[in-house]
Image: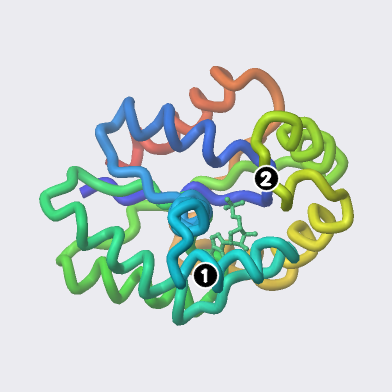
């Protein structure tokens, strides 16, 4: 299996690139943010809980997120592989993902990380707010909190993969196609 973590701060382009990579490599794309938004739309109990954190730019608690991710992975028996977008976001989530994949006799092939500077991220998210309808994109204070949470709680996850020689950073600024090419150059070597 080819199992890729697509990593990067909010607004780095993970969703856009995940969709392109999903198609190219026939992977199942799991975006935990998208799954939470589906639950919010469906007014489920999980959706109500997730919304209270998402609206503030905080992380949804690990137990909830890990349980949901596990259920999503289990829906796709026989997949050629997965692209994880927006997960893992904490060290506990990274450990849980390893454990889950281990139980399926597989593992993370590598983490590819989109590197984008903070001012560009804020500009992109405020722009995206015009079409995304996402409350967490529309308010600069919430965006800044999401980036702060990323730096404090999520960026250490990269060190976890670095220590296993599974971290590959790419410059996430420029033409979408050029960024895709940089990602593919790495993923082709992970196959
Ligand atoms: P995203 O669509 O990846 O930008 O995620 C939007 C929001 O969903 C985040 O700001 C968090 O509140 C929540 N979220 C998404 N993925 C996770 C995760 N792996 N762990 C905790 N919260 C998450």
Does residue 107 appear left or right of residue 140 in this picture? left
Q: Earlier in the sequence, mark 2 or mark 1?
A: 2
Seen at 35% across and 37% down, the residue is 189
Q: What element does badge 2 sit on?
A: loop
For residue 49, which quarter of the picture? bottom right
Q: Quadrant of ligand 1?
A: bottom right
Q: Quadrant of residue 80?
A: top left
Instruction: Judge by depth and name the residue closer to the eye, 166 or 29.
Output: 29
In the image, what residue occupies the spot 30% across and 59% down? 72
Few, some or many C-alpha atoms within 10 Å of disc 2 (few <14, some 14-19, many ≥20)? some
Q: Is mark 2 within 8 Å of ligand 1?
A: yes
Q: Nearer the viewer, mark 2 or mark 1?
A: 2
**Left or right of residue 82, residue 139 in this image:** right
> In this rendering, does residue 111 appear at all?
no
What numbered label is drawn on residue 114?
none
Q: From this view, report whether residue 61 is shown above or below residue 155.
A: below
Identify the residue at the far front of this view: 43
Position of the C terminus, as image quadrant, is top left
Q: Looking at the image, do the residues carrying marks 2 and 1 touch, with CB atoms under 8 Å apart?
A: no
The residue pinned by badge 1 equals 160
What is the x, y in percent for residue 156?
A: 63, 69
Label 2: which residue?
134
The response on whether ligand 1 sits within 8 Å of label 1 is no
Measured Cα–Cα span from mark 2 to mark 1: 30 Å
Residue at (16, 66) in percent of width and height: 104
């Amino acid at each position: 299996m080819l199992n890729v973590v697509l990593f990067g701060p909010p607004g780095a382009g993970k969703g856009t690139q995940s969709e392109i990579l999903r198609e190219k490599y026939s992977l199942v794309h799991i975006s935990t943010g998208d799954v939470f938004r589906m639950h919010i739309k469906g007014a489920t109990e999980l959706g109500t809980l997730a919304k209270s954190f998402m609206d503030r730019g905080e992380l949804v608690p690990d137990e909830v997120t890990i349980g949901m991710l596990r259920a999503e992975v289990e829906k796709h028996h026989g997949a050629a592989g997965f692209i994880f977008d927006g997960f893992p976001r904490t060290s506990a989530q990274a450990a849980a993902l390893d454990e889950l994949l281990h139980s399926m006799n597989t593992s993370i092939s590598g983490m590819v990380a989109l590197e984008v500077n903070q001012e560009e991220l804020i500009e992109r998210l405020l722009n995206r707010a015009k079409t995304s309808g996402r409350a967490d994109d529309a308010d600069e204070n919430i965006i800044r909190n999401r980036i702060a949470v990323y730096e404090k709680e999520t960026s250490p996850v990269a060190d976890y993969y670095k220590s296993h020689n599974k971290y590959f950073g790419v410059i996430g600024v420029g033409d979408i196609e050029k960024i895709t090419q940089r990602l593919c150059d790495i993923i082709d070597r992970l196959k």
